[in-house]
Amino acid sequence: MIERTYIIPLRSEWLKIPRYKRAKKAVNSVKSFLAKHMKAELENIKVQKAVNLEIWKHGIKNPPSKIKVNVQKDDKGIVKAQLFGVPFDVKEEKKEKGLKEKVLETVGIKKDEKKDETAEEVKQKVKQGEKEIKKELKKLDEKTEELKKEPEKPAEKKTITQPKTEQKVTETKRKEPDEKTKQELKAVEEITQKLQRDAAKKVKLVK
């Protein structure tokens, strides 16, 4: 393990090119300087994030004139350059997940998840969903018809015996539907309305 510190001059290099390319040239000059002095190949030189941020701090047109760097060379020949005063093994703090990302994770959708489904597969899934919705709507319609066509209970006949004439008088009373049946009918109608809305939305998405 070899450790060194260098003050790398940059101005003489980035003055040779246009202003809108100066920061890129400065980074490349850091790599070429380290390759020359550490006797390594350009592929094996790795500039750390802090060095890159220091060069790009004032934009692409205004890089620094020089930069001080700590350098380490491994046994494998890999050279790492870090800004002077910054340790090499710096772990980046993990950002806390926002509310949107947490909700997506609970649903099972990842942010960087790639969608490989073609348009035909999506259409097929929508068609299957429409068929299922239609089946459910038919079932609900059948249930509503059955509830509406339920036979009314026969009118109860009451015989009133009069002691003198001994005549029988029948009184008929019509019963209104119970509260339970009314609630069931309302629930069925609400479900049918929801299913119809979902079907309409899916049809719009397909179009």
Image: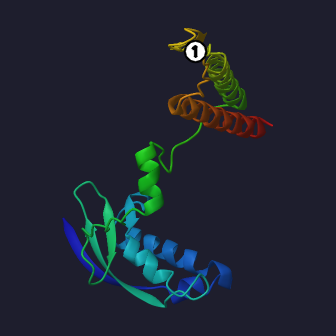
Measured as percent of width and height from the top left, residue 77 is found at 29, 58
Q: Quadrant of residue 48?
A: bottom left
173 versus 79 height, above or below: above
Q: Quadrant of residue 25?
A: bottom right
Is residue 147 visible in the rendered image? The answer is yes
Measured as percent of width and height from the top left, residue 61 is found at 62, 86
- Quadrant, the N terminus: bottom left
Q: Is residue 96 left or right of residue 113?
A: left
- Which element type, helix, strand or loop, lies under badge 1? loop
Q: Residues within 10 Å of mark 1 (few under 14, many from 20)?
A: few
Q: Residue at x 48, y 44 (%)?
A: 109
Q: Residue at x 77, y 40 (%)?
A: 204
Q: Work out whether residue 152 or residue 147 is closer to the camera in this orientation and state it.
A: 152
Measured as percent of width and height from the top left, residue 60 is found at 59, 81
Residue most extreme to the front: 164
Measured as percent of width and height from the top left, residue 81 is found at 34, 72
Q: Residue at x 57, y 84 (%)?
A: 59
142 versus 68 height, above or below: above
Q: Work out whether residue 4 or residue 142 is closer to the camera in this orientation and state it.
A: 142
Amino acid beneath label 1:
Lys
Q: Is residue 28 left or right of residue 120?
A: left
Label 1: which residue? 153
